[in-house]
Amino acid sequence: MTRPATHIWRLLKWGRTAARHGALRGIERDPNTPAPVKRLARLARLGARVPKVPDYAGAFREIGPAAIKLGQSLATRPDLVGTDAAENLLTLQDSLPPVDFAEIEASVAATFEQPLDALFSHIDPEPVGAASIAQVHQAVTSDGRTVALKVLRPGIREKFARDIETYEWAAAHVEAMGGEAARLRPRLTIANFKRWTNTELDLRREAASASELADACRGIEGYRIPAIDWDRTNGRVMTVEWIDGIKISKREELIAAGHDLPALAERLVLAFLHQAISGGFFHADMHQGNLFVEPDGTIVAIDFGIMGRIDRRARQWLAEILYGLTTGNYQRVAEIHFEAQYVPSHHSVGEFATALRAVGEPMRGKPVKELSVGQMLDGLFAITRDFDMQTQPHLLLLQKTMVMVEGIATQLDPDINMWDVSAPYVRNWIRDELGPEAALADAVKQNMATLLRLPDLVRRVEDKFPPKGGAPVPPPLPDIELMWEKRERPGRDWLGYGLSAALGAGAVVAAMALGWIG
């Protein structure tokens, strides 16, 4: 187990880096920041040249690969880091200098335990992309197919494991301060981050995600997932079909190629809704670099290290919430939040509906270009605080992906109205999944299943199992001993020890924005 002193040393280094990029200023100014954290933020920036405009993305980029991924994860938490920081972190590009090709070549050969020429007739030494976890090379297989070869950076698994251990330690200390920190649940944020990165660090799981999504998307016209070459894929190497197309970010090239940009924008939105609402399994890293348009107009997605999943009950609630917002039925949206137990029952459904109306009405019927995302988020976060809503981490990836999809769709078609595009799909899904016929079929199926489970249900009632709400049971969190809870040991200088504890906890907030950056 890593000693607290080691965590503190890492956090101090990261905190100084954050200070040089101005990433601590918001912590000091935000009224929700605990006083000890504010003092420690000021201490961390002593002697640093602080820019006028904070560069959160630059700070995470300089800290290292795991921090880059953490920064991208925190971009989904404007409630935790603030809207300005979240918008800045959305610009965080996962790009690092490439590993020398000799190391990559040796790594590929070692993972397959056979000569490379038995698998590939050629691998281009120049990578087409180099990210924090892996880099990609174009290659030609021994049977003549052009493929993309994704290879983990040597030693990256060990480095991520070390840094994430410190993130867990830091988050536990921050959350133990109580108040707003407890409501925002930074420990659960780090737990989700750890789960996502563990998936990305096993390329077999990424390949499986791509395969599962490909099956789910077969019915979506004009949207597809590239094929996996399973014979040339393992935990450290993934081989996938090479895509010849135009990056969706290159608007002028798309126009020159004759593509219908409004049609592409609508197709992208509907593809995402199909994945999230119909399938409950969606590509959660749909930024511009991961989407291509083929000559026939088909959108092709790549890079499946980060995927989102929500269960059917949550999808039903999500669909009703979206439809309620598009139609102005705020009462029903409020009722769903109470049914899902997102809002504690001691609050008023009617008051919550009114609060939602205050946020939703200014958005309805307007194109995206006329909306202020910042104002909308500020209003939503104020609601979560006023109504004691705990963060729902299982929906954070969904929210992040919706923002990404909205941004790309708006760049393709500045006049697109997300509500108008979404409403027919959501309405039809609700009719098919929640209408009378579907309700009858579900009732028969559920009643039969209940009869078969009756003995177990009786035992559960006897054991007083609590009812489940809309949020899934959170994953088990690591048992981390808090420094101020340690028993006194002979010869221990408790004043210095307590100061070290506070410094470590505060440095985490400063270094990684695990606090309130306004």
Image: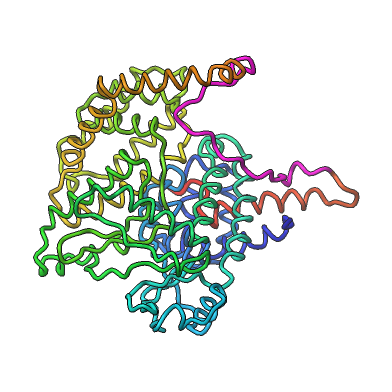
Along the viewing direction, whichever of 398 and 384 lies nearer the viewer? 398
Seen at 46% across and 61% down, the residue is 22
Asked whether residue 352 appears in the rendered view, the answer is no
Q: In this rendering, would 232 be left or right of 464?
A: left
Quadrant housing the N terminus: bottom right
Seen at 47% across and 54% down, the residue is 25
Query: Is residue 63 shown above or below 177?
Result: below
Judged by its main secondary structure, the magenta piece is loop
**Magenta span covers which residues?**
461-487
Q: Position of residue 399 (x, y in %)?
A: 36, 44
Way the structure is coloured: rainbow
The tally of labels here is: 0
Along the viewing direction, whichever of 461 and 34 lies nearer the viewer? 461
Q: Position of residue 57 (x, y in %)?
A: 42, 62
Check residue 281 for magenta coloring: no
Query: Is residue 63 shown above or below 219?
Result: below
Query: Is residue 154 shown above or below 170?
Result: below
Image quadrant of residue 43?
bottom right
Q: In this rendering, would 22 be left or right of 256?
A: right
Along the viewing direction, whichever of 367 and 478 lies nearer the viewer? 478
Asked whether residue 9 appears in the rendered view, the answer is yes
Give the residue furthest to the right.
490
Seen at 58% across and 59% down, the residue is 44
Q: Position of residue 324 (x, y in %)?
A: 25, 28
Q: In this rendering, would 330 be left or right of 75?
A: left
Image quadrant of residue 146?
bottom left
Seen at 25% across and 44% down, the residue is 372
Q: Position of residue 5 (x, y in %)?
A: 73, 58
Q: In this rendering, would 40 be left or right of 352?
A: right
Check residue 464 for magenta coloring: yes
